[in-house]
Image (spheres, helix red, strand yellow):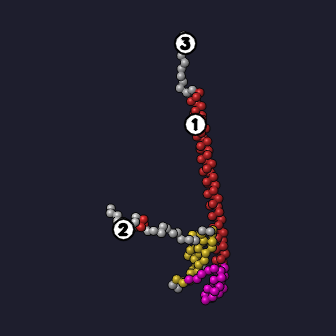
Amino acid sequence: MQKEKRNTGISVGSSSILVIFVVLCLTTFAALSMVSANADYKLTQKTAQATSAFYAADAAAEEKLGQVAMVIRGNPQADWQEKLQPLGISLSYVGEKIILSYEVPVDEGKNLCIRLDENLNRLRWQVMPIQEWQGDEAPMGNLLGEGTIIIE
């Protein structure tokens, strides 16, 4: 009598293919993790630079605010313009209120804009872009061409 060989379903070749597939999946996930970690690192570096630039500008703005306070409290209102102008601070009038404003650079694209009233209450303490955003020069209607009529 001959013994029948039973086929168990998984042979040595299929287990090798399974191991190769698992190794390829793990290698792919490792590469994706490295790329993601590198992108997170670069973003963290940019965030740290932006944060330190903002706090440096904020400290400079607070220092200038101290200089403004010394000028305002030590001089009559008529002398404020000539004393504040060398500090780079402009005076404007809104009705009967006096508005003091100045800017401190944060980086090459942004300034910290400060507006104060005559009592040194903060009206604005905000980071603003240096240049206003300019959209497309052509209005939307000109994209369709001159004399185009749209009927819905």
Residue labelled with disc 3: 2
User: Residue 116: where, in percent of width, then height?
Assistant: 58, 78
Picture residue at 36% right of the left edge, 68% below the top:
147
Q: Residue furthest left?
A: 151
Q: Magenta includes 58?
A: no
Q: How many marks?
A: 3
Q: Please provide the residue range marked out in magenta.
A: 67-92
Front residue of this view, candidates 47 and 23:
23
Residue labelled with disc 2: 147
Report the amino acid beneath label 1: Phe
Report the amino acid beneath label 2: Gly
Residue labelled with disc 1: 21
Q: Quadrant of residue 59?
A: bottom right
Position above or below: 81 against 43: below
Q: Secondary structure at mark 2?
A: loop
Earlier sequence position, callout 2 versus callout 1? 1
Label 3 – label 1 distance at C-alpha: 38 Å
Front residue of this view, candidates 82 and 55:
82
Residue 94 vs residue 105: left or right? left
Earlier sequence position, callout 3 versus callout 2? 3
User: Residue 83: where, in percent of width, then height?
Assistant: 65, 85
Q: Are marks 3 and 1 in contact (CB under 8 Å)?
A: no
Picture residue at 59% right of the left edge, 43% below the top:
28
Position above or below: 48 against 90: above
User: Residue 105: where, in percent of width, then height?
Assistant: 63, 71
Q: Main secondary structure of the magenta part?
A: helix
Picture residue at 62% right of the left edge, 44% below the top:
30
Quarter of the image with the C terminus is bottom left
